Amino acid sequence: MTQPPPDAPTGFPALPPTAAELTAARAGVTLRGGRIVGALGVLAALTALGGLLGAWVLWLSFRTLPRWLASLDQWSNGDLAQLDFAGLVPNWTLPALLILTLLGTALCVWAILVDRKTVGAVRDQTLSPSAAHLDALERSALTVRPWITLGQIAPIVQMLLPLLALPLMLGLMRRGDPQTFPGLGPLETATLVLGILVQGLPTLVITWLILGSVRRWLDAVVQRARRPLAVRPAARALDPWLLFTVVLLVLGLAGLLLGGLPLVAVSAFVGGAPLNDPQLAALGVTPAALRVTLLLGAAAMLGGALFSTLLILLMAWSRGFATNVATVLDSGLPGSTPAPIPDPWNSPPQPAQARDPS
């Protein structure tokens, strides 16, 4: 019986890097690793500063809101229900929000510093393998894995918080103006819930997949130090996700610039506009206040643009760093130069073999 032919190969094995590729990869690990470590330090400082500014804005808002509600109540001439800030907002709300803001900021800074330490450990073990560097790499990987899992779970929490806060917000709106907000029916409530889910699910899925690819690449790097394991497949799987993240960040950066720069331009014209309405002035709506509000909004957007620019650079450097690390590790022992392939055209000619005339 005729045997079936063997299956044709579906691909080609990955060729070992050449000496030039290995040299470029080692230089890339040094350069990009240093840039990522430095950028993560700057990112941690900006995150801490942003958290402190957010806490200050929150505290200032709670101090200003009672006066603004009192002015709004006088301006409405009794059309609105009596707006009692102390009755609407419990006393523990501001301390709780401040604690949550500062705690969230501290966790973000901690996670960034853990990532920074892990990148440094990967760089050191890749360029100068040793028992001390391997121990530092394994400890860093063991520390960063729970943070990666937390990053995958965080979008779920962010999606659930608006759902949990929705009844509270509707209750406050109904209490403040029962005529305008008598309540929401099942259809309106279902629409709001569906809108929150539609906005949150893409972020949840994308974040889960990206961080999963990062974890698999890191696991491959750590395991490569213990046994022969190819790292380049994990790096190739991670690269499209990092590129996708760069594209999303660039789009977000464009949106922030398009939103922030016009606010700066508009604020130059608002300051000179006359406004003599005493009712609006009682609410704090004056040309100077409008200009400050516009400038603060522009500053927030431009600050977000700076933050996005830093993230774009981090993602771009991370793409090259992951590929360079995989190239060095897959070349054999880090630092070893692969043997050159002999070129048949440069070898000396071989004498022709004698023929038998018979």
Image (cartoon, rainbow, N blue to C red):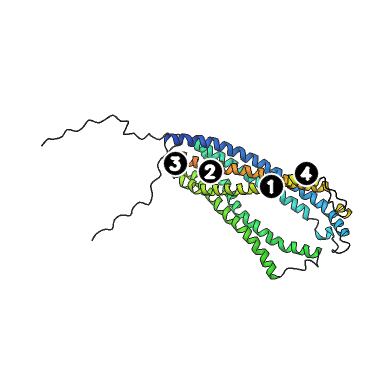
Q: Can you identify the residue that label 1 sits on?
A: 105
What residue type is disc 4 on? Answer: Ala
Between disc 1 and disc 3, whose residue precedes?
1
Q: Is residue 333 left or right of residue 156?
A: left
Q: Can you identify the residue that label 4 sits on?
A: 268
Residue occupying the point 63% across, 54% down: 154
Give the percent coordinates (x, y) of residue 191: 67, 66
**Dot 1 crowding, Cα within 10 Å, few <14, some 14–19, many 20+:** many
Separation of marks 2 and 3 at Cα, in angstroms:
17 Å
Residue occupying the point 71% across, 43% down: 49
Vertical relation: 163 (above or below) 243 = below
Q: Which mark is residue 69?
A: none
Residue that lies at the very extreme toward the bottom in this rendered image: 186
Separation of marks 2 and 1 at Cα, in angstroms:
27 Å
Separation of marks 3 and 4 at Cα, in angstroms:
58 Å
What residue type is disc 3 on? Answer: Asp
Q: Which mark is residue 319?
A: 2
Secondary structure of the residue carrying tag 1 is helix
Q: Can you identify the residue that label 3 sits on?
A: 330
